[in-house]
Amino acid sequence: MKKLFYLLWCLALLTASCKKTSNDPTPEPPVSGSELPAGAKDGVAFINNGTSAIVTLYAPGKNSVALSGDFNNWSSTAMKKTNDGNSWWVQVDNLNPNTEYAYQFVIDGTLKVADPYCEKILDANNDQYISAATYPNLRSYPTGKTTGIVSVMQANQPVYTWKNTSFTRPEKNNLVVYELLIRDFTTDHNYASTLQKLDYLTTLGINAIELMPVNEFEGNLSWGYNPSFYFAPDKYYGSKTALQNFIDECHGRGIAVILDMVLNHSFGQSPMVQMYFDGSKPSASNPWFNTDAKHPFNVGYDFNHESAATRKFSKDVMKFWMQQYKIDGFRFDLSKGFTQKSSADDSQFRMYDAGRVAIWKEYNNFIRSIDANNFYVILEHFAEESEEKVLAEEGMMLWNNLNYNMNEATMGWLGSSDFSWGFYTKHGFSRSENLISYGESHDEERLNYKNITYGNASGAYVIKGNLVTSLKREELAAAFLFAIPGPKMIWQFGELGYDINIDFNGRTGEKPIKWEYYTDPNRKLLYDAYAKFIRLKRNNNIFNASNSTYNLANGIKYIKLTDASNTVMVVGNFDVVTQTANIDFGSPGTWVDAIGGSINLTSNAYTGTLAPGEYHIFSKVALK
């Protein structure tokens, strides 16, 4: 049903794009046999101090392409076709460098599309809902002149002056990422209002923010995984300079900014889809997209990453965001989908794919050629372990989902509560820095919702329906999550025990923004515990120790970390009844508890009796 809905949406967009208005230009005949001028590039290249522009469109196989816009009163100016037949260009003169000009391409006399490389679009249907506070002085749509999405160009765009030019990115092993959806983080849903919460985030101790997709997507209210324009920040969150300022201010607080990038697929609003579309799906002549998706997880239209046109476009996108916005990393959505090998189900889809590995090596090497300074390349891959190992050895970081098993543990259901998949050695990796583990993400059910809805009970100890106990179970799990070596990620408000069902108002629909949680004493205790665990992880190298043992299969769980100067033992009872631990600590003597107090062992054996939900973080040398 979801795919059918998207197809109907895309057909409606395509129909609207093809409709003529009374002001539609009459196309001039094409001009053939011309080379691109010096300095031309895909999209717009300004020359003559911004008073002229060379506008270029890659459109192989088209019979004619014309340019229409404010600069020619929406009449038709024929574009010249290059000798190879692949690109079309025209020079526009007499421009005011300070003026924003709206424009479109008219292809084969009927189809009107915006520029795939533009940095701003106008949308008659959605721009009206963007407030002046979020996007000041947003120019109006050229109503009556044209229809469909319109691109905007301006030679003298507002230029942001960067303040924090010497930011040092956190080492991968010390990375604590906060995944954030601008739409559902503050009621004003913009970069400025999110900046006002930086004190909250720095006190929590995170050192990276992963923004869910912020490039133009269809509509305003979205997770952002329905992208259409890759160089234009979505105006519903703010302007280009507002986003640059957000990143700059984060850098000033020691926080890296990672961008969620969706290059597995695009949607029907994309001009690259519309230009080669047979009425229901991309045509066989589409330079960028597969006619049919190659894998079962696809939504929208599936990019063909073995196409030279797609690889060029993808690299252009990556380079643009790295250089224009000074981002610190990409999280690539559905990276496993960068394949031309057809699969019917995930058992086939996840198997080692040499072609997919080659694609990712090429992209990773390209990114490093632009910025080799600890730039983060994070893949939502979930492929067969041998494939992920190869990618990890190339320096890429792999998402690692612990949600199901960790939630079983927090609910007190022990049968499937082993979350030892969080250890990099179980993946065959040689370094912990390549595995980024999490208990929650945008795509998983909230741990505390399931605690409150389905939690276990024994006698007076009840998780289900008991907020205080449910939050303490979250604290218990967090103590273990942050003790596992390697980078970590948390989903927004998980540190406050957010307990709204992921499917509330539809899976990708707006969710209640619960800043009042922070003033709830019990939820604030969880926030403070997260802050403590993050501080311990970041301040003590032992939490990146390569020497670790653990038993996470039973009610009593433990993690033992050892380095040359210290030993840490994290011990907790995930059962709903009191249990006695029997664990070899490796040495007798005094053990300091980071939670408070200490114990003195007369032998190597620790035989403490733990109440349900109780945990300790012991160390031979006090942790910082």
Image (tube, rainbow, N blue to C red):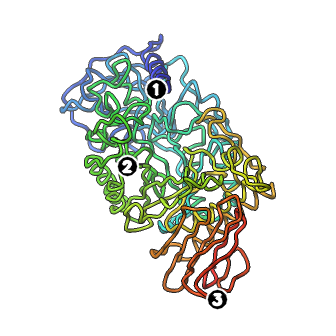
Which residue, given by chain and number where applicable, does mark 3 sit on?
602
Q: Is residue 324 left or right of residue 140?
A: left
Q: Secondary structure at mark 2?
A: loop
Is residue 621 or residue 256 the one in the foreground?
621
Image quadrant in which the C terminus is located: bottom right
Which residue, given by chain and number where applicable, does mark 2 sit on?
383
Q: CA distance from mark 2 to mark 3?
A: 47 Å
Is residue 106 or residue 38 the one in the foreground?
106
Dot 2, how many residues are within 10 Å of its Cα: few (below 14), some (14-19), or many (20+)?
many
CB of mark 2 within 8 Å of CB of mark 1?
Answer: no
In the figure, residue 236 lies in which quadrant?
Answer: top right
Please tell me whether residue 271 is drawn above or below residue 16 in the rendered image. below
What kind of residue is marked 3?
Thr
What kind of residue is marked 2?
Ala
Q: Residue at x 35, y 32 (%)?
A: 293
Q: Is residue 93 left or right of residue 212?
A: left
Q: Is residue 455 left or right of residue 42?
A: right
Instruction: Point out residue 64 in the picture as x, y percentages from the top left corner.
Output: 28, 21
CB of mark 1 within 8 Å of CB of mark 3?
Answer: no
Q: Is residue 152 left or right of residue 196?
A: left
Is residue 283 or residue 455 the one in the foreground?
455
Query: Which of disc 3 and disc 2 is earlier in sequence?
Result: 2
Q: Secondary structure at mark 1?
A: helix
Query: Which of disc 1 and disc 2 is earlier in sequence?
Result: 1
Q: Secondary structure at mark 3?
A: loop
Q: Residue at x 31, y 17 (%)?
A: 28
Q: Which mark is residue 3?
A: 1
Q: Is residue 234 in view from this perspective?
A: yes
